[in-house]
C-alpha cells in the first residue's frame, strides 16, 4: 500500500455498486480470490486540474475518484476512474505514477478488508 494515511474511515458504509459517470479509464481486475457476486471497493488519486504534483493527502482527498464493482461470473470486476494524478510524498519526496488501490468486502465479517492492494496503470 503506497499511501500512509488510513483511508478506511472513508470507505463506503454499504456495498451498493457505483462508479464515476464521467470516467476516462475503464479497466478490468481479474480476481483469483474473489467469487462471482463479491464486491470490490477501488479508489485512486483525483485528477490534477493544474498538472502540478499534488501532495499525497490532497491527491486522495475524500476518495472521490472511486467506485464499487461486483465480480462477475468470469471473476472479473470492471474499474471506472478519472485519470489519477501523479502525486508526491512530502515526507521523502517520492513521486508515484498513476495507480489505484482496492479492498475486498468480507462477507463473513460484513466489512471492507484491511489489506489494501495496488495496481499500477499504464498511461499512454
Image (cartoon, grey):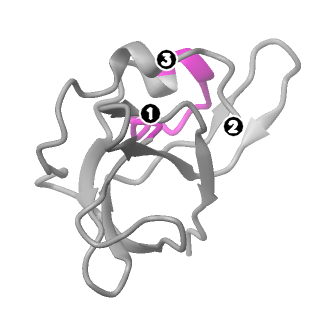
Q: Up-down: is 93 above or below 41? A: above
Q: Nearer the viewer, mark 1 or mark 2?
A: 2
Label 2: state its secondary structure: loop
Badge 2 crowding class, 10 Å Cα cut-off, few under 14, some 14 to 19, many 20 or more, is few
Q: Residue furthest right?
A: 92
In this figure, which residue is indicated by the disc labeled 1? 50
Residue span colored magenta: 44-58
Q: Is residue 118 left or right of residue 102?
A: right
Q: Residue furthest bottom?
A: 74
Report the Cα–Cα distance between label 1 and label 2. 26 Å
Say if the magenta span includes residue 27.
Answer: no
Label 3: state its secondary structure: helix
How far across and down, in percent of the image, does residue 1 sit? Answer: 69, 37
In this figure, which residue is indicated by the disc labeled 2? 1
In this figure, which residue is indicated by the disc labeled 3? 58
The label shown at residue 93 is: none
Mark 3 or mark 1, which has the lower sequence index? 1
Q: Up-down: is 23 above or below 116? A: below
Q: Up-down: is 34 above or below 30? A: above
Q: Nearer the viewer, mark 3 or mark 1?
A: 3
Q: Quadrant of the C terminus?
A: bottom right
Amino acid at each position: 500500500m503506497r499511501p500512509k494515511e488510513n483511508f478506511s474511515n472513508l470507505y463506503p458504509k454499504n456495498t451498493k455498486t457505483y462508479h464515476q459517470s464521467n470516467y476516462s479509464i475503464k479497466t478490468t481486475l481479474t480476481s483469483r480470490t474473489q467469487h462471482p457476486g463479491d464486491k470490490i471497493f477501488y479508489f485512486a488519486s483525483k485528477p490534477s486540474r493544474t498538472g502540478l504534483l499534488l501532495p499525497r493527502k490532497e491527491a486522495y482527498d475524500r476518495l472521490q475518484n472511486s467506485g464499487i464493482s461486483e465480480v462477475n461470473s468470469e471473476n472479473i470486476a470492471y474499474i471506472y476512474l478519472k485519470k489519477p494524478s501523479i502525486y508526491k510524498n512530502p515526507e521523502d519526496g517520492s513521486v508515484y505514477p498513476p495507480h489505484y488501490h482496492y479492498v475486498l468486502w468480507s462477507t463473513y465479517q460484513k466489512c471492507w478488508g484491511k489489506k489494501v492492494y495496488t495496481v499500477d496503470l499504464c498511461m499512454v
